[in-house]
Each structure stands twice: as C-alpha cells, then as structure tokens.
Amino acid sequence: MATIEVDGRTYEVQDGSNLLAECLSLGLDLPYFCWHPAMGSVGACRQCAVIQYKDAEDTRGRLVMACITPVADNLRISLNADVARQFRADNIELLMINHPHDCPVCEEGGECHLQDMTLMTGHTSRRYRGRKRTHRNQYLGPFVNHEMNRCIACYRCVRFYNDYAGGADLEVLGIHNNVYFGRHEDGTLESEFSGNLVEVCPTGVFTDKPFSDRYTRKWDLQTAPSVCVHCSLGCNTTPGERYGELRRIVNRYHGDVNGYFLCDRGRFGYGFVNSDLRGRFPRIERQPVAVAGTAIEHFRTQIRSAKGIIGIGSPRASLEANFTLRELVGETNFFLGLDETEHDLLESILGILANGGIHTPTLRETEQADAVLILGEDVTHSAPRLALSLRQSVRNATFDLARQLKIPRWLDAAVRQLEGQVQSPLFIASVHATRLHDSAAETFHGSPEAIARLGFAIAHSLNPESPLPSGLDEAEEALAALIAGRLREAKRPLIVSGTSCASLAVVQAAYNIARALPAQNKGLLYALPEANSLGLTMIGGRRLKDAFARVQDGSADTMVILENDLYRRAPAPQIDAFLDAARHVAVIDHLENPTTAKAGLLLPAATFAESEGTLVNNEGRAQCYFPVYPAQEPILAGWEWLIRVMDNPRWHHFRDLTSACAAAIPALAGIERFPAEEHLPKIPRQPHRYSGRTAMHADVSVIEPPPPQDCETPFAFSMEGDTVHVPPALLPVVWAPGWNSNQAINKFQDEVAGPLRSGNPGIRLIQASGMLPWFDRIPPAFVPERGFWRIVRLPNIFAGEELSAHSAPVAERFPDACVFVNPEDAETLAVSNGDSVEIRYELELSSLRIPVRIDSTMPAGLLGITAGLPPFRHLPNGARVALIKAGPEAPAKTGENQ
Amino acid sequence: MKAETNTRSLSAAEIDEINAELPHYEDKSAVSIEALKIVQKHRGWISDDSLVAIAEYLKISPAQLEGVATFYNLIYRRPVGKNVIHVCDSVSCWMLGSDRLSEKLCRHLNVKPGEMSQDGEYTVLPIVCLGACDRAPVAMVNGELRPDLTDNIVKELLGE
Ligand code: SF4
Ligand code: SF4
Ligand code: FES
Ligand code: FES
C-alpha cells in the first residue's frame, strides 16, 4: 500500500499501480481515452493529465499523465488545479477538432465515453470553425459498422484487436492528423472477437451493425443481467429489449469469467430470439391454439392417459426446467438426452472435476497460467472466450521479465517491446491447425487417438506411475518429453481439454497429466458442448438409448422432450423410429426444428431473454439469467409449462423451484442461496430516462397498460424501484452519473478490473477434492484404412451452436462447406483444392458432393467437416465413409445435399 | 510510370534485392520499408497488388504493411509523375511562405497536391521538415534538396 495525497486529501492506494487506475478506483472522476483496464497504459491521448508536486513546499508542480505515472508513497497530486483542468479542456478541444457534430445521428450517443469525457472536462461549446478532415468508411462484415470521421486517434481499437486479441487485419494507416483505423481494403473483420471494438472504441467509429437495423438508445432499452447461452463458459451479458424484440447484447463485466470481453458468437448470436422460426403458439396435432390453458389441458389429459411417461432433458435448458421435468416424470423416467459418447464424456468429466482433486480455474485464472497444454481442443471454436484468455497467458514470461527490468506490467507499450524475447509456453495438440497456433510454442496434429496417446506419454514422463502408451515413435516421445519438461518447471501450469474430440481417452489423458504435475497451483479445465452441459450432468439421468428401449418395449408411450432437438443426438432413422412409436410426443422448445415437426403437442418456450433460469458453466459455476422482458403468453418458460401441467404442484415460483432443486440434488445444494434473496422494493429494468412509455402502445390503445408483473425475480418491468441498494451483480444496466458508457463499471468495483463490489455473480458448486486412480485405457494408434476415411467434426464458432446459428449475421459468417483432407489423401483421390468429392456413408442412402480443401495439418485418413453446417448435419463423429472424386458431370454449384 | 509492372507477383530482380536486405534484420517483417523502397524503385509507386505481393513475400498481413507504407511520405500509394517535387510544409518553411510557393507551383502545373500533371511529368507533394530550416523555404526534387526558394519557384525548380 502507498499513501498519496490528492487535492489535499490522503488516500491509501495499491502500490505499483498507475495513478489513473488508482484515482478511478478511489471513485474520482479523471477523464481518459487510451487507457483501458484490461490493456493498460500507453499515454497516447494526453487526456488524464494531473499536477504532480515535488513536496509540500512545491506549489507549482508539473503536469504529468496519470496513466503512466506509477503510484509511490507520499505522491502529491492535484486533479483540480486550474492548470490541470485547463490542460484537459484544451486537450479534448483539440481531439474534437475533427470530430463531427453528429451526436444526434450517432449510435454511440447516450453511451459514449467521448460525450462523457467532454462533459467532464467542461468542453461544452465548440469554437473550431475550420474544415474537418473526412474519411471514406469501410465495409467490415456483418457485425461492425465503420464511421471513421468520429475517430479521436486513441489507438484503443488496434491495441485490442491486434495486441490483445491477436488479429492482423485491422491497422492504423496514415500519419499525423490523417490517421485511419481500418483494413487494407473493405472486407469482413477476421477476428472472432471483433464485436468488442464496439465497446473498446470510446467513440462511434465502431458500432454494432445488427443493432443498427433496429436501433434504440441505451436509455430506452429494457435490460436485465443475463448469461450467454451459446457455449459452456457462461460469459455474463446485458441483453437489451425494445418493443418486444431483443435488440442487442453487450458485455456485462464479470471479474472471474469474461472480464471486459465477449466473443462474436455470444454478442451477435441472439438473433434466434426474434427469428421467424420461433413457435409463438402451442400446437395440438398441427393446429395452433391461442391460449396456453387449452394446451395445458390437453397436456394433462395425455399425461393422465399415459401407460408410461418419459422425459428427455436438455443441456441447453436451465437447471430448474430440467429438474421440473424430472419431478413430473419421476427420477427413473428422466433421460439426459445426450448422444452416447457425450453422455460418457460428461459423466467422466464431472467425476474428474468432483473427485479428481484438481482445481478448475476461472477464465481469469487461466490468464495467469505460466505454461498451458491444450489437449484436443480448438478453443477459439469450442470455447471462444477462453482462446482470448489463453492468448494472455503466453505473456506471463514477458511480465516476469518486465518485473526484473522494473517495468510496471501496466506500461503496455514498454512491456510489449519485450514480447519477442520470452514467452510462456503454450502447447497445442489438436486435430488440425487452430487459430491459436501463432501463439503456440509447439503444435501437434493427429487423430483423437494420437492426441490421447501423446497426452498419456506426457503424463508418464511427468510421473512414471501413469501408464505409458506402447509403440510411440521417436518424434512423439521427444515431443512428450519436451512438453512434460516445460510443464514440470511451471509454477501455474494449466491443462485444457474438452469434448470436441469425442474421445474419453483424451479427457482422461488430460487428467493423468494434471495429476502428474508437481506444481501446487495447477489447473485442469474442460470445454464442454453446451451452456448447461455440466448442470444437466449434475442433475443426472439415464441414457437416451434407454429411452429408446422404453418406447420399444412398450413400457412408455408418452414422452415430454424439453428444449432438445433429438435429431442432433442420434441418426435420423433412430429418432424417427423412436418418435413414431410413441403415442404422445410433447415438445417444449423455442425454435421449430426437426423434433418439433414431429410433436403431437408443441409448447412454445421462452428463451433466455424472456425467462429465468440457472446454468452451470464448465468450471461448475451456477449463474442465473433473468428475463429481460416478459414472455408473451401463450409462450411460457419451460419450467412454467411443466409446473402448470402438474396436478398439485408443490411449487409455484421460480425461487421455490431453485430451492427444491438444491434440496433434492446434493451436488446442487449451493444454489439454495441463489438467486439473491427477495429484493424489495424491486429493481427497475428500465433506466430512469426510459422514454415513450405512455405512447409506445398508443397505436393499439391510448390507455397505458399497467406494467407486467414479475413475481419470480428481484426485478420489475418498470422505471420505478430501488436503484440505490442494488448489488452490482444484479445491476440491470451499467450506468453512473456522468458515466453513460459501459465504462461506468469502474464505479462498481473496489479496484479497477477487480471483482464487482459485493462479489462477482454465481456460485462455484464444485470444490476440488480427492484423487482418482491413473486412467489406463490407452487407445491403440489410429491406422487409416485403405479406401475409407473417418469423419472428425471440427467445431466452429459461427456454425457450431444450434441457437446462434439461427442469427442472420452469424449465419453470414459460416465458413464455406468443404471437407478438409491431408495432401497425401488428396493425391490418392487425385483431387486438388476446390475439386469435389462424393462422400458415401452407410447410414445415408444419398451421397454428398462437396469441395475439398487440402490442409497440410490434417492427419491422414481423417476427413474434417465443419460441425453445424447444413450439409453435414447427419454425418456423426467417427463415421466411416468412402470418398470418390466427383465426376466431371458434377454441377458447378456444390455444397448442397444431393 | 511503370504501371504495367504492378502485378501481384514480385519480379526476380525485386526478390533478389529484397533477399539481399534480409540478413541485416532480425526477422522478415523488419524488411518492410526496404522492400517497399525496392519495389517502388522498380515500379514507380506501390499499387494495391504490389502491396499484397510484398506482404505475402514477407509473411505479414497486408494491413500491417499498409500501416508502414502509408506512414512514410516517400512511399507512394498512387501513381506519381516522373519528377516528384516535395515542398516542405513544416514550421520554418511555412513561416517563410511555403504555402504560397507550393500553390504557385501547382497552379503552373495545373495540378492539386498529390495529382500527376497531364503529361505525366510532375507530382507535387508536401513533406515534413527536411532539416534545412536555415535555408527555408525548401523543396526536394527527385531526392535532391532545393533550398532558398523564392516567388520564382517555377523557374527555380523547373527551369522554365
Ligand atoms: S477508431 Fe475508436 S478506438 Fe480506434 S483510435 Fe479511433 S477513437 Fe480510438
Ligand atoms: S459463446 Fe461462449 S465464449 Fe462466446 S460469449 Fe458466449 S459464453 Fe462467452
Ligand atoms: S489515458 Fe492517459 S494519456 Fe490517454
Ligand atoms: S521546416 Fe522546412 S526544412 Fe525545416
């Protein structure tokens, strides 16, 4: 700690930090542009000037930039000195010289850091009357708008995009007063994290493009705390609604999980909520019905007359919805609704997390790892935000070097100068090259078996008690020894694995390595398939194939399928047979899909934006999302449909349900204290400036309807309520007086970039304990079979997730449909890049004609396909297919199911 | 103007010259400026295709190379005349009337700054301080310093 004096008052602050960060942590208003809490200081904008005094005698002092001034004991500064104020006002006036006067039509308006800072410095009238420089804007793809005239040249965008996120296609071009932040030509921004530019840029240069289509000012959006539903990491989000439509998603700071950034799937994937595929009415035998009650009566009759009923849960439905279904049908009739392999993988991973005795790090902790091994994942595609964190981990060696050289870690430009000299090792063993390869010390490509075998070899090298795979070649042995050596030296080594390889051996090899590591402070993290995969597994239930058997043997004739498109879980003929054999099929879901098409009774379910629920992320953190706006009856939350159909429900409210779930399932006991107790008066979802409330329904009726009641959560669909005593974790929107942008978050942390005041959201349900025996099921090496290929499904950030794939801008980012083959295989097939091949798969009558992409990192004998792309929906992982070069009569148009 | 050589691939001569620079630097990307100069020497200016060709050769992204190319006054991203006249517009020269002189020159050649004259002979561009403030106003014609300019700039620089 250091004692400093600011304008005559003394404060205790964090030693070694910079003055700007500490002033903000103290709650003082000091304007800034180029500094960013996650990216540190470069001293480029000159906006954070303060006066620093030598000692008590010094009355004049000198101007310094707070963001590049280290805090030291007895530092005396002034924010309010006239010279400092004048300098800041002049500086912003200069920065604004070229800035257009277009706030009224600028989408940043109302949440603009530049507006906030101009007001803070008192520069409220513009004196410059000269010509302003203007720029041509670029097309940057479906996610981000470009309006370069608004730029104040703070350099934050390129520092985020290139330095922080590893991008290479956004640069600063030009010089002096003609700098331009853009691409070398028009085109889609390639980074999977491009959407963060919208929040990183303090002005309206980069804005949210899908939001533009149906734009609303921040103060007119109704919001609530939410959790991203598009992968297993559980990033926190703030979705915003207007006129019954979800309009956008922005980052919601979580000190342990996503910090300040989201991935583009999470930010732009919400389009499914507004999609035409949404079921808006219940459907009984293909006929829509107008009221929920009719559907519920029908549902009840079906259940009463059932000979046997089974329920199929879902890894993308909340704990509460899954639990209610389990209660409705009975524990023995509850099935998890996962494919066989996934069921095995998830149960094994849960066992490892709970009983393996190895700490599962938070995303924030992964950034601190000083050696990382990724075993079998392409994290950019399977757990995107994690890729951004791991990119930071390789910098730890640089930070250590900086410390030796007495360069503070936040002095970003100086620390980055050291980057080429040292790097913390990142090792990646994956099926083929991943997006993180540019940061990797060593990479290995191979079949899932080869990856697992390498993993076991590393574990053995670390601890000879861990079994050794036989028949490794020299190169593999050497690589295993090298990786083991670096991991052994590390103080905070991290092993990342997951379910992408669909291989139990990979998951288990990762555990052996983690167990074998000598470091105390080690971590093991698994990327899982869906938002609540772990939660569902913790509830526990039977296998999908047992459900098939129950219908087959006639012991069940009625089924309730909760938010789960079974055609994604097993081959179509199997699901067809299953659904056709049942007398009654009730399906609860958001979007029309092949399963809902077969439903005798369809119950339209509210999405995450219109309902409440708890999800358990891949680290075992239970987090709650709250409805942003009410579901329009007859749309109901999944759990509500299920409660309403019960004859004598024991619970009527969400909170009771959460408690019941906690009481019934020991592993979930932690959610008992959760969500925050009753909050009275309620927390308003609408900002105090929310406009048009009396007029927004006037086209229907001039009588202002009463606001919808929310009996389930601490929030109200209203402007009225308590905004003062709200714990930051429950803030519907981040806002503070004078701070209209998301950067107001400074006001809700005790230390910038630290935890939210009164705690980050969520409860970790799993404490690492125990130890598992060494796993010893080492698979034999994969040997390609002449004339056949094995399908490997490669995850993709845009195409790979069921719901976000229905968001139009995300769909625009789907990769081309093609198959990845090894160069030698291409030679065998006599195909070159772009030629089509025909894929013959036993279970499918039709064959598929698709262009080839030759990928030198693809292992021989494997055929890589992009999971989630329409042509590949029915090709399961591991399928054995034959390939032939498509004949010359092949139509020019490829990529479609023929 | 040698626009016809502005193709997507580098010529053998260009590659040889770039390769000769490589040993002087730690990594390939550091050769960016030299490579741009070499290619410009051969082609007169750096077209989009030339830029991409160099970027591919140096294994850096076109955006990164564009950042370098547009930073330097002496790398031309548009075609220039056979003779490039850089008139200094930094403070000493500006105080001694370089604006007026440059305008005069442009009027004579019937071009705006940055444009090529009709006959392809001349381009006039501003440049930062040439380090000859004591002899301001100053220009640089085809790399050669032309100090002590006066209102006779047309004659002084073009000999007309
Ligand atoms: S575009 Fe935005 S973030 Fe980038 S330099 Fe300009 S103002 Fe800063
Ligand atoms: S998809 Fe995953 S990584 Fe991306 S924002 Fe959502 S939770 Fe985070
Ligand atoms: S924030 Fe300190 S100089 Fe930009
Ligand atoms: S200002 Fe023109 S040469 Fe220095």
Image: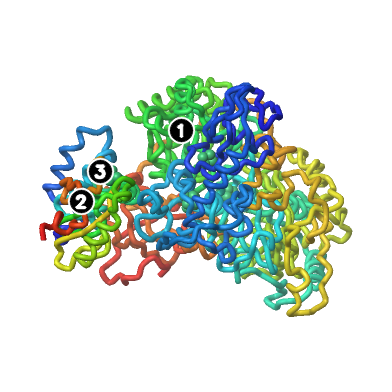
Q: How many angstroms separate mark 2 from mark 1 (CA)?
A: 56 Å
Q: Quadrant of the N terminus of chain A?
A: top right
Label 2 lies in ligand 4 vicinity (Cβ under 8 Å):
no
- Circle 3 Cα neighbour tier, 10 Å, few/some/many (<14 / 14–19 / ≥20): some
Depth check, mark 1 against mark 3: the one in front is 3
Left or right of residue A108, residue A411 in this image: left
Up-down: is A387 above or below A192? above
x, y percentage for residue A577?
A: 60, 64
The answer as to whether callout 1 falls within 8 Å of ligand 2 is: no
Q: Are marks 2 and 1 on the same chain?
A: no
Q: What residue is shown at x 44% (from left), y 26% (from top)?
A: A468
Q: Quadrant of the C terminus of chain A?
A: bottom left
Same subunit: marks 3 and 2: yes
Q: Earlier in the sequence, mark 3 or mark 2?
A: 3
Q: Dot 1 falls on which chain?
A: A
Q: To which residue does mark 1 refer?
A: A394
Q: Amino acid at mark 3?
A: Leu
Helix or strand or loop: what does disc 3 sit on? loop
Residue A437 in the image, given as x and y percentages of width and height? 39, 40
> Within 10 angstroms of label 1, few (less than 14), some, or many (20 or more) residues?
many
Of B34 and A594, which appears nearest the observer? B34
Residue A116 in the image: state x and y as whole percent.
62, 51
User: Taking A633 as reference, is A83 left or right?
Assistant: left
Disc number for residue B149: 2
Contact? badges 3 and 2 (CB < 8 Å): no
Q: Which residue is the site of mark 3?
A: B130
State the residue at coordinates (76%, 49%): A331
The alpha-carbon separation of the residues under discs 3 and 2 comes to 14 Å
Q: Chain of mark 2?
A: B
Q: Is mark 3 within 8 Å of ligand 4?
A: yes
Determine crowd level at label 2: few under 14, some 14-19, many 20+ residues with C-alpha closer than 10 A: many
Residue A448 visible in image = yes
